[in-house]
Image (cartoon, rainbow, N blue to C red):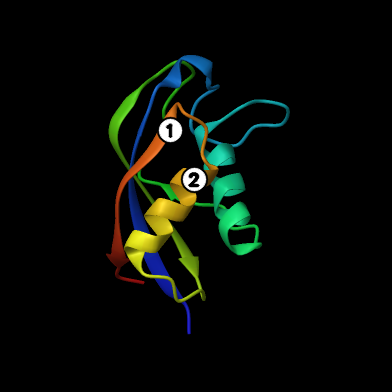
Amino acid sequence: MSRRLQLRLAYNGERFSGWQIQPDKRTVQGVLRDAIKGVCGETIVPKGSSRTDAGVHAADQVASFTTTKKFSPDVWRRAINAHLPNDVVVLRSSEADP
């Protein structure tokens, strides 16, 4: 059974080309996708509540993704953070409505 997780992120956007994945660019969505893959081995592209442009910071960006993995939200938060670069952090994670 799949479930949806919501992540609350903060990031320093100085070295990002915005939120959305772009070819050959470092993006927040891209590093988050890679971190999720590092945790569960699946390529899951997270959805953001909004997009940010290049160089824009976020203090509480909302993202979500669907998975069949049964890790608790706190395990997801800690595991994703272990795979993220220093300029992005998952502040909180929780179950979300599908």
Alpha carbon of mark 2 to alpha carbon of mark 1: how far? 11 Å
Q: Residues within 10 Å of mark 1 (few under 14, many from 20)?
A: some
Label 1: which residue?
88
Most foreground residue, 69 or 96: 69
- Residue at 54%, 44% (x, y): give it: 83
From the top left corner, tell me how far across and down residue 87 is, in percent. Answer: 45, 26
- The reply to whether residue 51 is visible in this rendering is no
- What's the residue at 45%, 76% (across, down)? 70
Q: Could you say whether the residue bearing mark 2 is in a helix, strand or loop? A: helix
Q: Amino acid at mark 1?
A: Val
Is 19 on the left or on the right of 34, as rendered? left
| Amino acid carrying mark 2 in the image | Ala
Helix or strand or loop: what does disc 1 sit on?
strand
Q: Position of residue 93 (x, y in %)?
A: 31, 56
Q: For the C terminus, give its image quadrant.
A: bottom left
Residue 48's label in the rendered image is none
Mark 2 vs 1, N-terminal side: 2
Task: Check the image and name the residue furthest to the bottom.
Answer: 1
For residue 32, above or below residue 88 = below
Residue at (47% x, 28% y) in the render = 86
Q: Is residue 72 left or right of residue 32?
A: left
Residue in the foreground of this view, choosing between 76 and 44: 76
Image coords of residue 84 (percent x, y): 51, 39
Determine whether, in the image, residue 10 is placed left or right of residue 80: left
Residue 8 appears in the picture as rendered? yes
| Residue that badge 2 annotates | 82
Q: Dividing the picture into quarters, in which one does residue 25 lie?
A: top right
Q: In the picture, residue 26 is in which quadrant?
A: top right
